[in-house]
Image: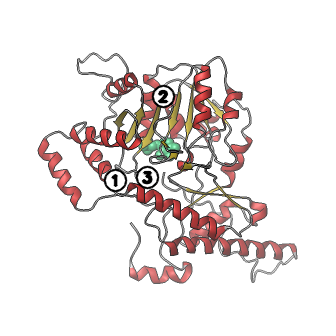
């Protein structure tokens, strides 16, 4: 998926020292051998919700060490249908520092989102903030394993059981994450994974709901099929949220080499930590001791004062160097148009701070050591340039020569990245 045009790479190299580095690249994608699977599916005459989907559910359940896995068309649909199948009414506590789709299932179900602040270190929902937001009408807690870092699931399960409300996890980033030896996928009432192209296990499109609850699994199997269990007389309002056989077959291919890819992402993250260690004003997401993250994203928090420039300036600087960096998640959900009007106006200071400083750097298992070094060098150069600009501004330099003359529009809004 890399740009390897030898003609253009020379030009690009002159400016940036290499080819374009995307933020993410789809992983575990088969080659031509997939055409054999596709042929078999076509010959079987069953194009959706058939043998491949059942196999994917079995393989995923075995991997996650969870009794039931229900394949759906997306994580968004899985969350929406899980909330529906649990017949929730009232408020749901969730983080605002997440992808907006986490919250969409609530609005589709007429549930009220109540945002809780995140933890300064892990960027995941803070259990203490959840406790503060509990009310008599709280119907559930919806946690998110941000960038693959497990949320504080043990504590959240305690809160959930002592209040008699379900815990649901948006595990879109966390296929392969663990707390100790226990897999993400085994917590709460259900955990919902995404198999879309930027995630760790890729099916093109798709989602998986993992649950230990047999009745919920049955409900979801009906719900993904219009709510129809086969008698043409639905009891629950469902959707067509089935997974096609082709997507399931692609997802199955992704299991080979999955552990090695997650290990590689962990190595890349360590290389980033070492490479960026000396640069002031950069901080990293912390993963609790004993937990394993997939590092679906490599998140850096930029402190503009200590670093010398704003996060947005840095995004534009990296873009100039052919390095795609993204502000993910910004703006936080409570400041987005859809949610600003339902936000209860109680402040979320940590969410705002993290969201305003967040920057995601390229990470995918095919990223080479020298690519990581190149990104680290670019960040160091950016810091030095920012220092020079600041120093010469302090010295009252008015001239438009070096170095105060900026190499690009510092306020240029970076283009929105992919999901
Ligand atoms: C990608 C993502 C989703 C949505 O997943 P889809 O499979 O595309 O519906 C939900 N939540 C988070 C945190 C995500 O990153």
Q: Residue 189: give its label.
A: 2
* Mark 3 / mark 1, whichever is N-terminal: 3
> Mark 3 packing: few (<14 Cα in 10 Å), some, or many (20+)?
many
Give the distance between the C-alpha atoms of the residues marked 3 and 1, in whole angstroms. Answer: 9 Å
The quadrant holding residue 193 is top left
Residue located farthest toward the left when viewing the structure as drawn: 43
| Residue that lies at the very extreme toward the front in this rendered image | 181
Image side of residue 85 versus residue 305, left or right: left
Q: Are marks 1 and 2 in contact (CB under 8 Å)?
A: no
Within-10-Å neighbours for mark 2: few <14, some 14–19, many 20+: many
Secondary structure at numbered mark 2: loop
Check disc 3 and report the residue beneath it: 200
Q: Would residue 20 be visible to someone looking at this image?
A: yes
Residue 255's x, y, as percent?
34, 52
The residue lying at 39 percent from left, 55 percent from top is: 258
> Mark 1 sits on what residue?
254
Determine the residue positioned at 56% across, 46% down.
146
Foreground label between 3 and 2:
2
Task: Kindly tell me whether residue 92 is visible in this rendering.
Answer: no
Q: Secondary structure at mark 1?
A: loop
x and y percentages locating residue 335 in the rendered image: 65, 40
Q: Residue at x 46, y 56 (%)?
A: 262
> Farthest residue in the right direction?
395
- Circle nearer the N terminus (3, 2): 2
């Amino acid at each position: 998926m890399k740009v390897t045009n030898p003609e253009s790479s020379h030009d690009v190299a002159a400016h940036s020292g290499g080819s374009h580095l995307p933020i993410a690249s789809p992983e575990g994608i088969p080659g031509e051998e997939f055409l054999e699977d596709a042929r078999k599916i076509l010959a079987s005459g069953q194009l959706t919700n058939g043998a491949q989907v059942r196999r994917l559910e079995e393989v995923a359940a075995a991997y996650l060490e969870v009794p039931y896995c229900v394949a759906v068309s997306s994580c968004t649909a899985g969350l929406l249908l899980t909330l529906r199948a649990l017949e929730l009414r009232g408020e749901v506590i969730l983080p605002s520092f997440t992808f907006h789709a986490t919250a969409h299932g609530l609005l589709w179900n007429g549930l009220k989102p109540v945002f809780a602040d995140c933890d300064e270190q892990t960027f995941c929902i803070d259990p203490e903030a959840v406790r503060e937001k509990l009310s008599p009408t709280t119907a559930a807690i919806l946690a998110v394993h941000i960038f693959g870092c497990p949320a504080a699931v043990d504590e959240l399960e305690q809160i959930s059981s002592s209040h008699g409300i379900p815990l649901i996890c948006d595990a879109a980033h966390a296929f392969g994450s663990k707390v100790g030896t226990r897999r993400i996928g085994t917590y709460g009432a259900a955990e919902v994974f995404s198999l879309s192209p930027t995630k760790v296990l890729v099916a093109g499109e798709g989602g998986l709901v993992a649950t230990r609850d047999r009745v919920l699994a049955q409900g979801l199997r009906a719900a993904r099929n219009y709510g129809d269990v086969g008698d043409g007389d639905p009891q629950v309002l469902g959707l067509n949220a089935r997974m096609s056989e082709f997507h399931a077959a692609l997802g199955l291919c992704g299991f080979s080499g999955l552990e090695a890819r997650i290990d590689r992402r962990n190595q890349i993250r360590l290389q980033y930590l070492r490479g960026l260690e000396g640069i002031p004003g950069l901080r990293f997401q912390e993963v609790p001791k004993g937990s394993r993250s997939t590092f679906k994203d490599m998140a850096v928090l930029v402190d503009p004062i200590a670093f010398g420039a704003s996060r947005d300036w840095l995004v534009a600087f990296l873009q100039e160097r052919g390095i795609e960096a993204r502000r993910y998640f910004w703006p936080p959900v409570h400041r987005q148009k859809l949610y600003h009007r339902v936000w209860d106006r109680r402040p979320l200071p940590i969410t705002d701070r993290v969201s305003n400083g967040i920057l995601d750097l390229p990470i995918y298992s095919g990223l080479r050591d020298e690519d990581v070094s190149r990104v680290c060098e670019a960040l160091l150069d950016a810091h030095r340039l920012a220092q020079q600009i600041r120093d010469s501004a302090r010295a009252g330099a008015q001239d438009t020569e070096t170095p105060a003359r900026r190499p690009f529009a510092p306020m240029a809004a970076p283009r929105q990245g992919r999901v």
